[in-house]
Image (cartoon, rainbow, N blue to C red):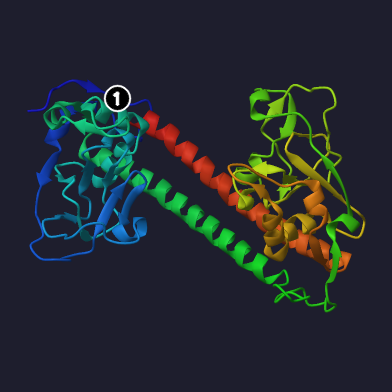
Amino acid sequence: MSDKITKSPPIRFAGFTDAWEQRKFGEIINERREKTKVENEDILLSSAIEGMYLNSELFSHFRGTSNIGYLKIRKDDMILSAQNLHLGNCNINKRFEHGIISPAYKVYSLVDVDADFMHAWIKKDSTKQFFEKATTEGASVCRKNIEWRTLYNQKMYIPIYSEQQKIGAFFKQIDDTMTFHQRKLELLKDTKKSLLQKMFPKDGADVPDIRFAEFTDAWEQRRLGEVAEFSKGNGYTKNDLRETGFPVVLYGRLYTKYETIINNVDTFVEMKDKSVISEGNEVVVPSSGESAEDISRASVIGKPGFILGGDLNIIKPKQEVNSIFLALTISNGTQQKEMSKRAQGKSVVHLHNSDLKEINLLYPKLEEQKQIGTFFNNLDNLIILHQRELNSLKDLKKSLLQQMFI
């Protein structure tokens, strides 16, 4: 029998006024241990923090001698990890109609609860705490053991079935919209990667595979030191960051944060003496990083007034070279390979202005450079738009999960 302790969430759909009922977790699930009897009886699946996957999507090969005795799973089953459940390795199988999974997991049918409702509940941040209350220390900090009887006796709040369906359908719609933007984002990034390979000349060529119709001349080659001036950023690291202050561009963010053009900065510092302030249109390249690939990239400072931090090489192109084009070309193709070769070091690699000056730059006439730069800038803006939309949806979902559940 369910305990008759009731409560309601802050946000509800119109028409629902009944209080939510407190029920034991074990009342809404039924463990199933249907095992395979022959090898490769069904597709091999794996449960991860991010969701359900084909085993081949996570691992390059089957890591085991046999899958006889694996557990059969169906659509809408709940899959719980025995050792890292508290980290979020719990899923409702919405992706696959059926499959098999390692017996290291536990598989459950849902009892009188909506699968989409439980899919939303199981990915709430507070659900990790729900599971952690039933854990004991395991072999490491990340691996904890579940006390199953304790877990089954823990209580959660559940509304009537029709309200569950309404909530589940609502969060499914958010998830579907997020999936659309994620796929669009991945498609745009793949398109950009492909076009970067085709709109800049390959090794040994002086024209690209794809170019705008009005341009036919061969590209010119010169050393970068002949067409640009060089300087260095100064004096700021992540330890100097503050909540507010002057916007600063730090070298580490070039790997993770920025696209080709830096127009917005969300890191701030207190101004120091001898700070280097951007005038706009500088090309910046990291002067140190963990690998040659990390530092073989460039971005354009799109606005004046940003502080340029330490470990930044600053390139100011002369009039014959467009800044956006320069950042694109030395971040891709033959110029990027040449930068990587010039980067030196073991645990930390370094790239100096003296190295950058020797790079052989291949470039077309200025008007073609501008068109290439504008094209990729527009593509970057689309990528940023979908990334922002995706981030907004994630934030919205997180907030609503807190307010539409108990």
Quarter where residue 36 is shown: bottom left
Residue at point 80%, 63% (across, down): 360
Q: Position of residue 218 (x, y in %)?
A: 83, 76
> Which kind of residue does numbered mark 1 sit on?
Ser
* Image position of 80 with respect to 213: above or below: above
Q: Position of residue 55 (x, y in %)?
A: 29, 58
Residue at point 57%, 48% (across, down): 387
Within 10 Å of disc 1 (Cα), the crowding (few <14, some 14-19, many 20+) is some
Q: From the viewer's perspective, is 192 left or right of 117?
A: right
Circle count? 1
Residue at point 58%, 59% (across, down): 189
Quarter where residue 113 is shown: top left
In this view, the residue in front, 53 or 59, is: 59
Quarter where residue 250 is shown: top right
Which residue is identified by label 1? 8
Q: Position of residue 339 (x, y in %)?
A: 71, 56
Q: Position of residue 334 (x, y in %)?
A: 70, 65
* Image position of 212 with respect to 331: above or below: below
Say whether residue 56 is visible: yes
- Secondary structure of the residue carrying tag 1 is loop
Q: From the viewer's perspective, is 191 left or right of 63?
A: right
Say whether residue 282 is visible: no
In this view, the residue in front, 223 or 266, is: 223
Q: From the viewer's perspective, is 150 left or right of 194?
A: left
In this view, the residue in front, 293 or 55, is: 293
For the N terminus, give its image quadrant.
top left
Residue at point 18%, 20% (across, down): 5
For the C terminus, give its image quadrant.
top left
